[in-house]
Amino acid sequence: MLERALMEAALGVLGKKTNHTAQWGTVACALRAANGRVYRGVCIDLRCSLGACAEQVAAGQMVTDGETRVNALVCLRQTAAGYEYLKPCGKCQEYLAQLDPANRETLVVCGEEAVERLGEGA
Ligand SMILES: [Zn+2]
């Protein structure tokens, strides 16, 4: 399995949770930054239709630490059977690329043995 540590980090926070006005955790992202640290995030969906993708939440923690470069990321969506791989949506691809143009080279794990570069339309 590619990027086992990232997979385990994402699985550790994957899982739907709710309160009266929000749900979160149906998608989880773990990314390895150039500083060597792993940052995690979960999607947040609010009743009013505002929200944030898991990748943006993870990247926000990375940027708070002063880092902008993402070397690799994994995104997982909760399913009835467990999980499936997700590729970053167009908004997240642009978000990461504008955060640091070198992020177009970010490795995106998109299967048990499959990776793409973010800039390849991952
Ligand atoms: Zn997204």
Image (spheres, grey):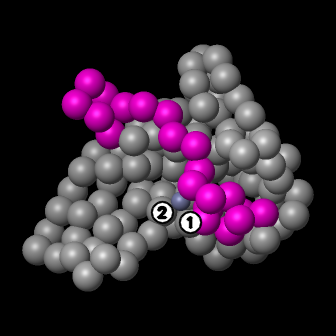
Q: Label 1 amino acid?
A: Gln
Query: Where's the C terminus, which quadrant?
Result: top right
Give the residue drawn at x 68%, y 68%.
95
Give the residue drawn at x 14%, y 69%.
19
Q: Is residue 111 above or below residue 6?
A: above
Q: Is residue 34 left or right of residue 26?
A: right
Locate residue 76, reporting x and y percent.
46, 40
Q: CA distance from mark 2 to mark 1?
A: 5 Å
Element under disc 1: helix
The reply to whether dot 2 and dot 1 touch (C-beta < 8 Å) is: yes
Q: Confirm whether residue 116 shows in the render.
A: yes
Per the image, the residue denoted by label 2 is: 53
Give the residue drawn at x 17%, y 62%.
18
Q: Nearer the viewer, residue 65 or 63?
A: 63
Q: Is residue 18 left or right of residue 15?
A: left
Residue numbers of the magenta segment? 78-97
Q: Confirm whether residue 36 shows in the render.
A: no
Q: Is residue 70 magenta?
A: no
Q: Which mark is residue 56?
A: 1
Query: Where's the N terminus, which quadrant?
Result: top right
